[in-house]
Image (tube, grey):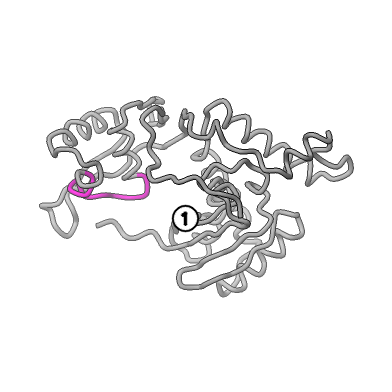
Amino acid sequence: MQARRDRTDDTHDEEVRLFSTDSRVMAIDSPIKNRILELVAHGPVPFDKIVEATGKAKSTISVHIRDLELAGLIVSRPGARDSRKRYIELSSESIGRLTTEDRGAVVPDHIRKRQDHGQPFADDDIVSFFRYVVQVFRTQAMEMGINLDPVLRRTGIEIGRTLAPKVAGGSVEEVVRKMNAFWQAHELGTITLVSTSPVTLEVDGCFECEDLPVTGHGACAFDTGVLIGIFSYHFSKTVNVVEEQCYSSGYDHCTFVITPVPEKP
């Protein structure tokens, strides 16, 4: 296992986050506003929780939330069960970040050796060529300070919806068995079902991230989206997928945990 960089907060003061609404695309460079947008990215969050997570005064957070609401990036509403509580949720699409966090990422030894010998892919192997294209695209984006995870995730969801009927089954075990057969047939990696409660998958030889530099955080936004598409179809409800371990964070495999998206409070 390679060394992992500590990463205690996903929001960096110097980064700019990009969001899309029905009428425009906006860049947000305020660290507090970006922190609020990060907190509500996966569902409604009570106002008090945002105040607690940011460590700022209620009046300060209120001003930032008002600005974000006026910009059309978030909405606030009373709770369905307790109207005294105020919930904040995202009403726009995150489309990327401009950030310097991955510019110093370390290129894996096996990639450096291949590059040094001038053999990044085999001439008669389309899979190795495709993996090389993905690796170059992602590393160049890192070096330029561009993070496109939201776009990759959204693309993955669409691909997952297309794949879902092909790997459909009566149980989680059957779905994973069919997924593993498809992944191996196309040299995308090997999928193992670790647990059914919650559904936890381990992927070895992950095509998306095995060849990426070590960044200290997960890099499988596309795979995450694919899993959302497949398992939302299987469970007939939207699921959330969290990548807990990744080649890019220093592990020798990727681990994904899949849970149903909770109902709105």
Q: Amino acid at mark 1?
A: Val
**Quadrant where the C terminus is found in the figure:** bottom left
Question: Is 22 located above or below residue 241 in the figure?
Answer: above
User: For residue 251, what is the image quadrant?
Assistant: bottom right
The residue located at (47%, 28%) in the rendering is: 98
Q: Which residue is mark 1?
A: 242
- Relative to the observer, which residue lies in front, 249 or 149? 249
Most extreme residue toward the front, as rendered?
3
User: Residue 185: which quarter of the image?
Assistant: bottom right
Asked whether, in this view, residue 193 is left or right of residue 41, the answer is: right
Inspect the magenta stretch and tell me whether residue 154 lies in it: no
Look at 39% across and 46% down and name the residue there: 8
| Residue 61: percent from left, percent from top | 19, 36
Picture coordinates of residue 117, whole percent (x, y): 83, 36
Left or right of 64 on screen, residue 19: right
Horizontal side of 49 relative to 210 (left or right) equals: left
Residue range in magenta is: 41-50
Quarter of the picture containing the N terminus is: bottom right
Residue 58 falls left or right of residue 26? left
